[in-house]
Image (cartoon, helix red, strand yellow):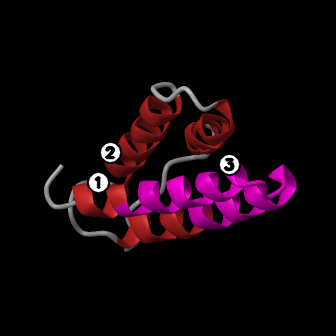
Amino acid sequence: MDNSQGLVDGYVKEIKQIAAKHQMGEDLATIKIKVDAVLEKAHEHFAGWVNGTPEENWASFAGKLYFLGNSVSDRTWADILVYAGESVKNTEPPHRKS
């Protein structure tokens, strides 16, 4: 996937930081709004990214979120990652901007 790994990992890190806020007590409704905003920003960014294809990067993003969400024992934190992964999976992948 060329040099897109850093792009994907950067957005995964943002979601993990938001999940940590939920773990520390921030309410779920606020957290989901923040997650959705990051996903929207990522979708737009992936469409313009020149390395790899937007579709491959989007699939990698979803995969990493699912993996992390299913590999940790703290459900409060993991549920946010799974929510983000589901949201990515259920959103049409970005397409290259012309």
Q: Front-most of 93 and 8? A: 8
The magenta stretch spans residue 68: no
For the residues labelled 2 and 1, say whether their Cβ atoms are less than 8 Å apart: yes
Q: Residue visible at 53% across and 33% down? A: 69
Secondary structure mostly seen in magenta is helix
CA–CA distance between discs 1 and 3? 33 Å
Pointer 2: what residue?
A: 56
The magenta stretch spans residue 38: yes
| Lateral position of residue 88 relative to residue 53, left or right | right
In the rendered structure, which amino acid carries the disc numbered 3? Gln
- Mark closer to the chain start, 2 or 3: 3
User: Which mark identifies residue 53?
Assistant: 1
In the rendered structure, which amino acid carries the disc numbered 1? Thr
Residue furthest left in the image: 2
Pointer 3: what residue?
A: 23
The residue stretch that appears in magenta = 10-39
Question: Which secondary structure lies at badge 1?
Answer: loop
Q: Tell me the crowding category of disc 1: few under 14, some 14 to 19, or many 20 or more residues within 10 angstroms, Cα based.
A: some
